[in-house]
Image: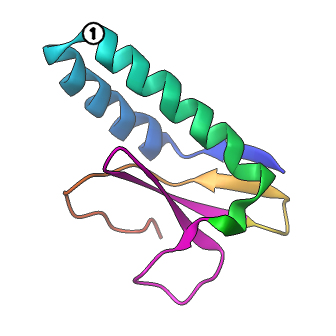
Amino acid sequence: MTLDKLPRFDDELEEIIQFIAEDSVNRALSFYDELILKIENIPTNPLIYRKRQNTEDENIRELIFKGYVIPFYIDKDSDKIVILGIFNQNLWDMPS
């Protein structure tokens, strides 16, 4: 499976990294590196991640990383994982 990221994910991640960097650039870089490594491992076994709670779709799953939720979609037809976004305590709506 290949990995794809929506622009929304990139925008949300950039905001989070900037926020962490205000306190510590090293922590921000470490957070980014660790998160990307976790995301890159999703395609090896995407079904081990929890199903998103507010949907019936078994193909929408969530990676939890340091209190952040990274929802993703398993697109079986295209044989890819689509990273939808990243959030913490803020409300997050699924893209249409």
Q: Position of residue 71 (x, y in %)?
A: 49, 60
Most extreme residue toward the bottom, as rendered? Answer: 56
Of residue 27 and residue 14, the one placed in the foreground of this image is: 27
Q: Quadrant of residue 17?
A: top left
- Residue 25, placed above or below residue 71: above
For the rendered model, the colour scheme is rainbow
Q: Quadrant of residue 9?
A: top left
- Residue under the image location 20 percent in, 57 percent down: 89
Report if residue 59 lies within the magenta region: yes
- Residue under the image location 31 percent in, 51 percent down: 87
- Residue 83, placed above or below residue 75: above
Left or right position of 33 against 41: left
Amino acid type shown at disc 1: Val
- The residue identified by callout 1 is 25
* Highlighted range, magenta: 49-74
Left or right position of 45 against 15: right
Q: Position of residue 30 (x, y in %)?
A: 41, 19
- Residue under the image location 49 percent in, 41 percent down: 7
Most extreme residue toward the left, as rendered? Answer: 23
Helix, strand or loop at mark 1: helix
Left or right position of 77 against 59: right
Q: Residues within 10 Å of mark 1 (few under 14, many from 20)?
A: some
Of residue 42 and residue 2, the one placed in the foreground of this image is: 42
Q: Position of residue 92 (x, y in %)?
A: 30, 63
Report if residue 70 lies within the magenta region: yes
Q: Position of residue 74 (x, y in %)?
A: 70, 65
Tally of marks = 1
